[in-house]
Image: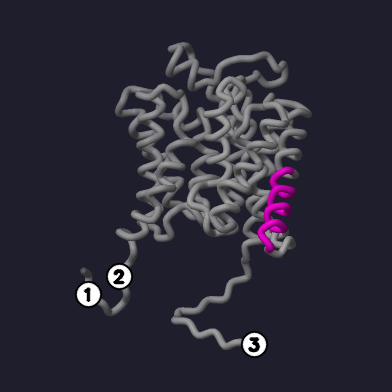
Amino acid sequence: MPLEISSGPHFRVKEDSRSIMLWVAIALLPAIAASVYFFGRNALVLIVFTTLVCVAAEALFLRLAGQPVNDIFNGSAVVTGILLAMILPPGLPLWLAAIGAFIAIVVVKGLFGGLGFNIFNPALAARAMLLASWPLAMTTWVRPFDAVTSATPLYLVNKMHQAAPAYLDMFLGNRVGCLGETSALALLLGAAVLYYKKIIDWPTPVAYIGTVALLSLVLGHDPLFAVLSGGLLLGAFFMATDYVTVPITGQGKFIFGLGCGLITVLIRYFGGFPEGVNYSILFMNMLTPVIDKYSRPRVFGSRKT
């Protein structure tokens, strides 16, 4: 076995990519349960189908690329599939979900080098491509329980200037939206699991959610509605904390969250789309190398340049 020599410090930890992905999947279980409760069996079918297609796409790509197929057992494809399903409309046709899964795994992750090399969050990038290609299907929403088409709370309030749903309904999840974004309670339970297991830390979610709430208040909008509506909580806790596509330092993560919050507010209140979480995180993904460069800590013993 070759001797590997590297500079310190050296830490040995129990967690690996597989265990981290497992805990992220466990943290998503409350949101999965809420989506099935509010949107019925079709929600479960969409989640399972999208996840299976992601795993199959990764296995096929690994085989064609001449890489070990057992790499699919690191769990990243499963988490990508669940997250992608969580940001899709409940009634989306399965063939569109399959295209999204292929884009996420093969185009966004595989062609960039696989896990650890993708510059964009795979699930968000796939959703953005689906939205650009099939806007009608991606913006057709149904109400919980009765599957009647309706508008999202953000569209009702920001674009149609109608009354917002009750806070309790938005907190529990009895509202229109993507599968995994409707229940704030379920997302907070999942976030608590991630914090408890130290899978994520506070700078990005706090900066992201705090920026959206503060700027909404400054602009004369309801900050609580701004936090509970749309995909803010899902994006802040499960997308903007991705290890691969966000900065590595605490300062960088805080800056990343501030940028996401600012862009989200600009899109929500001044753009043509009622929601800006998806594009805000993707845009900040592009700036991650720049943020890392200027938030890099000074090496101990060296002078600040």
Q: Amino acid at mark 2?
A: Arg
59 part of magenta stretch? yes
Q: Which mark is residue 1?
A: 3
> Where is residue 210 drawn, in percent x and y?
39, 40
Question: Nearer the N terminus, badge 1 or badge 2?
Answer: 2
- Tell me whether circle 1 and circle 2 mark residues in contact (CB < 8 Å): yes
Q: Main secondary structure of the magenta part?
A: helix
**Local crowd at mark 2 within 10 Å, few (<14), some, or many (≥20)?**
few
Quick one: quadrant of the N terminus?
A: bottom right
Q: CA distance from mark 1 to mark 2?
A: 8 Å
Look at 60% across and 15% down and name the residue there. 150
Look at 54% across and 54% down and name the residue there. 112
Secondary-structure class at tag 2: loop
> Where is residue 71 drawn, in percent x and y?
69, 61
Secondary-structure class at tag 1: loop
Quick one: quadrant of the C terminus?
A: bottom left
Question: Nearer the N terminus, badge 2 or badge 3?
Answer: 3
Q: How is the image coloured?
A: one colour
Q: Which residue is mark 1?
A: 303
Q: Which residue is mark 2?
A: 298
Say above or below: 19 vs 141: below
